[in-house]
Amino acid sequence: MAAAAIINGISTFIVIYTWLILIRVLLSWFPNINWYDQPFAALNQITEPYLSLFRSLIPPMGGFDISPMIAIVLLQVLNQQLLPVLGRTLIGLQMQFIG
């Protein structure tokens, strides 16, 4: 089923992206990391566009940035709540066209 494969692919992407954000958060605790050197620059380029969406809504407070937490929660809600509903809908539509 193509719909199930698409949903599984999106879910896998969300899990990997969540891990990348977590790795970035953990690395941010080390001030000596140069974010312009590889592989840190690549990690920054991959995660920054998504995280900046949340930073524009909730700026860092007292040097503490909660945007990664909110970003991860949103990814988890998408993965655990919305994707299963979308998957069932797509599979149902696929079954209507087949049968």
Image (cartoon, rainbow, N blue to C red):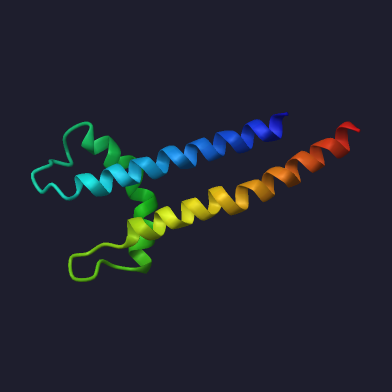
The residue sitting at the right extreme is 99
Q: Is residue 13 left or right of residue 43?
A: right
How many circles with numbers are drawn on the protein? 0
Above or below: residue 62 compared with residue 86: below
The residue located at (16%, 34%) in the rendering is 37
Q: Position of residue 25 (x, y in %)?
A: 26, 49
Q: Is residue 98 left or right of residue 90?
A: right
Q: Quarter of the image holding residue 19?
A: top left
The residue located at (61%, 52%) in the rendering is 82
Q: Where, quadrant-wise, is the N terminus in this rendering? A: top right
The residue sitting at the front extreme is 80
Q: Where, quadrant-wise, is the C terminus in this rendering? A: top right
Q: Position of residue 74 (x, y in %)?
A: 47, 56
Q: Position of residue 38 (x, y in %)?
A: 20, 31
Q: Position of residue 11 (x, y in %)?
A: 54, 40
Q: Quarter of the image holding residue 51?
A: bottom left
The residue located at (31%, 62%) in the rendering is 66
The residue sitting at the left extreme is 32
The residue located at (60%, 53%) in the rendering is 81
